Image (tube, grey):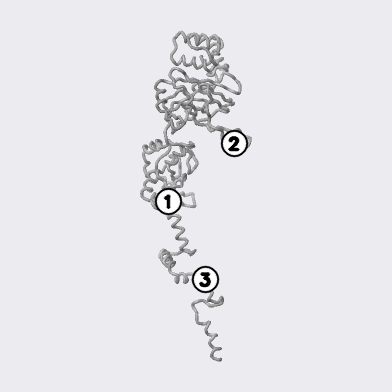
Amino acid sequence: MVMSLRVSELQVLLGYAGRNKHGRKHELLTKALHLLKAGCSPAVQMKIKELYRRRFPTKMVSPVDLLSLPHLPSALHPVHPDVKLQRLPFYDVLDELIKPTSLASDNSQRFQEACYAFALTPQQVQQISSSMDISGNKCDFAVQVQLRFCLSETSCTQEDHFPPNLCVKVNGKPCNLPGYLPPTKNGVEPKRPSRPINITSLVRLSTTVPNTIVVSWTSEIGRSFSMAVYLVRQQSSAVLLQRLRAKGIRNPDHSRALIKEKLTADPESEIATTSLRVSLLCPLGKMRLTIPCRSMTCSHLQCFDATLYIQMNEKKPTWVCPVCDKKAPYEHLIIDGLFMEILNSCSDCDEIQFKEDGSWAPMRSKKEVQEVSASYNGVDNLSQSDDHEHKRSSHDNNKKVDVIDLTLDSSSDEELDDEPPPKRPCPPLSPVSPPATKG
């Protein structure tokens, strides 16, 4: 009822309750709403109903006619729709200051505006004040007042989503919003990355003076939005890593079962996979894994490093698997017990091979492979004993000459091109000796 009153009616109500009745509409509305939150007397409640009835006579507010009133926010949208916002891993919710509420205006214009108000309790003021951290010229709060926007959808939990052309004022001061992203195509309207907005610096840390939030945006046909305000405590990547460790390490048998499943022969397939190669390097930092993890929803065995993954999402939260590019939210992360065992027992290789029975073996490193292929000098199919013999011969100059002669790839400067094979060295001398006898 209070939300639907005009300026003159709000002034009458505040004057009746003995409150200051000067200011703009959103300020008067905030005072009136705070009056209700504080618990007004029965006489003031009667006054609200009286002012409401004067504006909307009884004949107009029947259940059927109520839907035709655009100036009533609750007529077209539920004030508190059953919207649930997605949980943010880096923020623990301490209190709900304004639960998810429809963005609804009292006009039918394209550009909309709505006013909201909330007041802090002494305990909340204390929580925010005591979390203040001043470093250099910057003042940060670990406990924050967080403003969030999303679509008014109740089918599933909602990600943050800004209404178009959003503008926010907190206690009359403009609120900084994330900067626009560069447009992906020519002619496409630039878009802001939707994320929670920290409004703590604009909030009055007072138990007596309420806080107002004025939101303006552009309406969209077929789409409605909701906003909510929370009191949250910000957490660091170190805390999230600690919580992930506290969940425990997944039993190695889970991964072994996944290996066996992947390597089970498919009767319809002509090609059977008998082994799987997996890297022990993190795809994010190209360094050896320390805490191997992946999402429970991922179907691959390859892990990434939990520390690096969480730190990257602390700076820019995307929560996307670096292996398969599918969603890998924090709550779905698991530490792989089998990979922990492998990393602890295998320190001299960067790649392993899984076999059909779930066992594994280290793979030869690239450096070793290059050394071996170089020592072969291009000769294939050498046995293991030949390989050792060949390596020994590489240190002996005489034996090197023998190997080159056997390949028949080159000729010596001391030999003639038409010289017979080395098996018959004598025949070339026979035509030379007769002329010597005659002479």
Would you identify the image quadrant in which residue 136 lies? top left
Is 210 located above or below residue 412 in the figure?
above
For marks 1 and 2, give the CA distance: 40 Å
Label 1 crowding class (10 Å Cα cut-off): few <14, some 14-19, many 20+? some
Q: Secondary structure at mark 1?
A: loop
Circle number at residue 183: 2
Label 3 crowding class (10 Å Cα cut-off): few <14, some 14-19, many 20+? few
Which residue is the site of mark 1?
350
Q: Which sits earlier in the primary sequence, circle 1 or circle 2? A: 2
Q: Position of residue 112 (x, y in %)?
A: 58, 22
Q: Secondary structure at mark 3?
A: loop
Q: What kind of residue is marked 2?
A: Pro
State if disc 2 and disc 1 touch (CB < 8 Å).
Answer: no
Q: What kind of residue is marked 3?
A: Leu
For marks 3 and 2, give the CA distance: 64 Å
Q: What kind of residue is marked 1?
A: Asp
The answer to whether residue 82 is visible is no
Which residue is the site of mark 3?
408
What residue lies at 47% left-to-right and 44% top-to-bottom? 284
Q: Position of residue 382 (x, y in %)?
A: 45, 64
Label 2 crowding class (10 Å Cα cut-off): few <14, some 14-19, many 20+? few
Q: Position of residue 128 (x, y in %)?
A: 42, 25
Would you identify the image quadrant in which residue 295 lies? top left
Is 388 located above or below residue 321 in the figure?
below
What residue lies at 45% left-to-right and 60% top-to-bottom? 371
What residue lies at 51% left-to-right and 27% top-to-bottom? 149
Is 123 located above or below residue 42 in the figure?
below
